[in-house]
Every structure is written in C-alpha cells, then in structure tokens.
Amino acid sequence: MKILRLNEFDTKYIYEFYSKNTGLAEKNYVEQEKALEYDAYSYHGAWKYYLNMAGHECEEIVTNNAFMVKSFIKENGMPKNSKPEDVIAFHVKKIKPEILIFNSTNYKMLKAIKYKNTYLKLIIPWCGSAICDIRIFKDADFTLSCAPETVNYFRNLGLKSEHLDHGFDPRINLRLKSEENEGDFLTFIGQIIPKNDFHIQREIFLKKLAENFKLSIYSPKFNVSIFNDIKAVLSANIYLFFALLKKIGINEKWLYKIPILGKFANKNNVIGLIKMNEVLEKIAKPGVFGLEMFQIIKNSKMVLNFHADSSPEYASNMRLFEITGVGSCMISDFKKNLNNLFEIDKEVISYKSFEECVEKIRWLVDNPNKIKEISENGQKRCLKDHGISNRIEVFEKMLKKYLA
C-alpha cells in the first residue's frame, strides 16, 4: 500500500532548527528531510520507517516548512510565487499515494489535494484532543485520534472516527547521550495556554507546584509586548463573536471568507496570542523540541505530565510515551485508562490532586531508589507495548476495515 503522511510543525521549531543548523536551508530537499527525520520532532520519519518495515511504501512531507517548499519549487521547476497549498498538492500528485494521513489544520491545502488527486482511496486526518477546523474531518473517510473524547465527539456528529494511541520510536534512544551528570530535579515541558480546552488547570497547578519545589519549565513564551496583549484581546473577542454567529445558525463557510477577520473563526489561530501567568513566565525557559527535548527528559530525575483541559477523562497525550520511552520517571495526572497503559505506582506515578502530587514527589525524594526503579519499569513497558510499530499493527487493521 502506498501511504503518504502530511505533518504540520510548530513554526517556532522550524525556525529554531534551521537557525541551529547553519546552511541547512541551502541544501537540497532530500538532505533537509533527512535532518528533520533524525531530529524526531512530532514522530517525523517514524511512521515512514515502520510502515516501510511492515511492507508498505510510505513517504512524509512537512506541509508548512517554508525552506523545504522553496527547495521543492526550485527543484521541480514550479513558479516562484506558487501558493504553499498548491506546492504540497503537486508534491502529493507526484508521489501518487493511495492513502493520505493528514496531520494538518490547513483546510485549503486539503481541498487543493483532493482536487488534484482524485485517485486517493482514503483520506485520514489526525486530530488530538483540541479540535481544529471541523470541515477537515467532514471531508475525511475517517479520523484518527489519540483521545477517546474526540472519537466520541466525531461519532456523535455522525462522522467516522477511530482511536489510536500515540507511541514511541525506540530509535530515538540511540541518538541520545548517556550522560551521568545531574539533570533537572523536576521538569515540565510543554505549552501553557490559559484558554478553555487548553491549559487553564495546568497553569494553576504548575504555579502552586513551583511554590513547593525547584521546578524547571520549558515552554514557548507569548505576548512580551503591549501590542500583542491588545492583539490577543481583539483576536479572542472576534473568535467568541464568530462562535456566537455559528451557534445561531450562520453558515460557517461564509465566516471563513470574511477578509482578515475570517482567520479568527478558528480558535487554533488565536491560541498563540494568549499569555501565560507572570509567575511562570519569569521562571520558564525557552521551549525545547526534537532530540533536545528528549535529552532533557532523559537527564531529568522526574518529569511532569499534565493533560490539556480538552482531555478530562482519558490519558492520551504524547508525553506519556516520550517520558517513559527515554527512561525518566513520569508523574502524570490520573485518568481512568492510565492503568491500562502503565501500572500505576510501579511503572509510572499518578496523582488525583495537587496535595497527592506533592506527597508523592516528597516520597520519591526520600526514596531515590524508587525513582530509578519506576523509570526502568516504565521504560520496559513502553518499549514492549507502546512502540510506533505496535501502533502500525493496529492502523493496518483499520485500513483493511475501511478499504473493504
């Protein structure tokens, strides 16, 4: 089966990666792709590797990498002013996949791909717990999601959706340094966006935790200027106004067409404008990605995992497997399915309240041998049951079901 996975990256990661790898932007498309695959951000290259190992033909494309789009245009003789969505659609047509996995929020791109690639047998978007442009999922054959809440949401709308957990690529461990030096004591890595469906509870929890322990936070910082503060307020209010119009029955496709204002009809376009709490912003270090992130997790004694507000019931995020996969001690918020993934208090530590979290961290501090034991148990379980290859087996069964 010929499969193509389209992946959308955080633009902060793209520009930071290229700034750290001087001269990469001048290299050809294939060399840039290899560099990104090695850095392992957002599973890039992992699905390709394990699907090919399973006997398929798989390729991956980063849809919003301006450097690679520019290289592709040059190497394929396309007009220099080609729109990014048209470039990706042309690239897809050149590969001619039968199955398209669409991990992007760009609906225009999906439309362009469908228009130019009528031979596609299945279009499968990926959606986490926070739902972006609903039109993407209405145009799909079925949607993959790591979050059972999202699967249930789509099914209640009459849309086909399947659950597939995130996983870990064990090849990452071969790329990390086995340093014995002291890492962070207690680490949190991730975004802090104080907005409904995102991280309101996370922000409150981390602020209280920072008052009790030496906490290292690695998170992108937003809104360091008055201009951005004003922009954030305007953006949020435009989004809320559009949400109200949709609620009273205004067709959403017309909202998206309103010049300039239309882009705020999607909440994902305004989340980056929301500022984190001032206390956390003062102690937060810049966000980390790819192998740099995995190295910090590996070196940390304990790493916090805290789900977004849009995942109130089920454990479903990437950190579950990133933390355990590299062999650090995970301290995660309790979810009703967590014990199905890892044995609580043997392979991972779990808490139901702030008080319980503090109590368990203090217990671990007093029993450092337990940190090592839980880290090793968690890693063994992750590598055994939660590798990307395990997920590919489940995904193949889904393909057979929908192709039939």
Image (cartoon, rainbow, N blue to C red):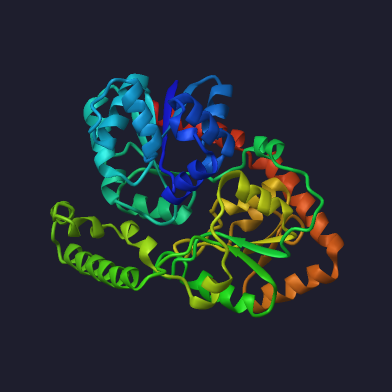
**Residue 231's spot in the image, x, y percent?**
29, 68
**Residue 142's spot in the image, x, y percent?**
36, 39
37 in relation to 107, above or below: above
Between 384 and 282, the one nearer to me in the picture: 282
Screen quadrant of the N terminus: top left
Between 365 and 40, the one nearer to me in the picture: 40
Between 323 and 355, the one nearer to me in the picture: 323
Screen quadrant of the C terminus: top left
User: In the drawing, does residue 102 fall left or right of residue 364?
Assistant: left
91 in relation to 202, above or below: above
**Residue 303's spot in the image, x, y percent?**
67, 60
User: In the drawing, does residue 346 fall left or right of residue 286?
Assistant: right
Q: Is residue 138 in view?
A: no
Which residue corresponds to the image point at 58% horizontal and 34% vertical from the top-left? Answer: 38
Which residue corresponds to the image point at 62% horizontal and 71% vertical from the top-left? Answer: 352
**Residue 370's spot in the image, x, y percent?**
83, 61
Which residue corresponds to the image point at 47% horizontal and 24% vertical from the top-left? Answer: 30
Which residue corresponds to the image point at 70% horizontal and 75% vertical from the top-left? Answer: 213
